[in-house]
Amino acid sequence: MTRSRSPFLLIAALLTPALIGLVVFRLYPIALAANDSFFNVLRGQPVFVGFDNYIALLTDSVFWNSLKVTFWFNLLINPIQIALALGLALLYVQNFKGVTLYRVLFLIPIGVSLPTAVLIWRIMLSQDGLVNGIIGVAGVPAQPWLTSEALALYSIIAIATWKGISYWMIFIIGGLQNISPEIYDAARIDGIKPWQRLVFITIPLLRPTLLFVLVADVSINFLLFAPIFMLTQGGPADSTNVLMYEAYKSGFIFGDMGRAMAIIVVVVAILLVIVGLQFKLLSGRKEAK
């Protein structure tokens, strides 16, 4: 009896710190946000308002614009990041002259903290910064990268992509290294062309890795906040006002914590639906095999 309980106790002891961390740092904040979304603060006192904060969001044009910006941002950035990370990972595992320098260059963004990266890019994208200097050589006039309604969101996408693709590239490199070289050797013997090896061998065998990267990438980008806070603060004209920044603005600038918590709950609900669909896709692929 003692022997049979020992593994259970050992597993419980090992998992307990992680479970405590999950409850304290993940589940408790979500439960707190859900609870606070049913209250408004009037004269310093919380007042229960039921679903009023959610009902108000339904007719709130600022919220709907923020939701649209968030979805548009994610529709663009996630395919771009995953496609670039895949291409760079494929290049990373090749052997060619100068590959060591290439590998160092593309791993540098991982070692740079996000606030530092944002500050560097803010300087480079300024009116008299490096980027405008480079395009000026080609005769292109200086662009208002962070102050133009038409360019600000795409500038943030470029910065977040520069910071993120090296991180996702590491996972894809791990997946590539798990593919047996014998499969590629057999393909070469059969005369299969390089693009056919990519489409019919590499990508299908990388599917679990790519789906994991997709789930994690969507979750992170949906909650992206720091570059928007540091560079544009939701502007100009709310063109970069994603849901997370709208929640921050509502709670910490306008003091409407009930509305802010309602937006956070909506964000979590949308993320759960998206991640659930992606895991459904992943399990569907496994069953198909």
Image (cartoon, grey):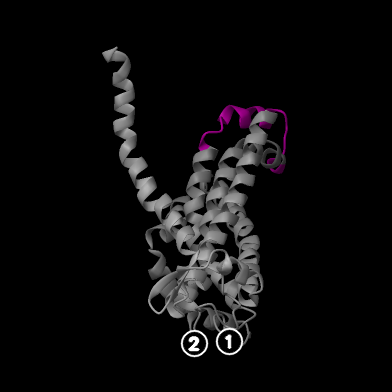
**Element on which disc 1 rests:** loop
Q: Which of marks 1 and 2 precedes in the sequence?
A: 2
In x, y percent, where is residue 202?
63, 38
Toward the top, the furthest residue is: 1
- Magenta-colored stretch includes residue 16: no
66 vs 101: above or below: below
- Magenta-colored stretch includes residue 189: yes
Q: Residue at x 61, y 66 (%)?
A: 73
200 vs 75: above or below: above
- Residue 201 image-quadrant placement: top right
Tell me the quarter of the image containing the C terminus.
top right
Tell me the quarter of the image containing the N terminus.
top left
Mark 2: few/some/many CA within 10 Å (<14, 14-19, 20+): few
Residue 38 visible in the shown view: yes
What amino acid is labelled 1 in the image?
A: Ala
Mark number for residue 142?
Answer: 1
Do the CB atoms of the residues marked 2 and 1 lie less than 8 Å apart? Answer: yes
Residue 97 visible in the shown view: no
Per the model, the C-alpha gap separating discs 2 and 1 is 8 Å
**Closer-to-camera residue (122/243):** 243
Q: Residue at x 65, y 66 (%)?
A: 72
In x, y percent, where is residue 138?
62, 82
Q: Magenta region: which residues?
A: 177-195
**Closer-to-camera residue (242/252):** 252
Left or right relative to 157: residue 99 = left
In x, y percent, where is residue 119?
41, 75
In x, y percent, where is residue 46?
42, 70
Label tally: 2
Mark number for residue 192?
Answer: none
Question: Circle 2 sits on which residue?
Answer: 128
**Closer-to-camera residue (247/159):** 247
What amino acid is labelled 2 in the image?
A: Asp
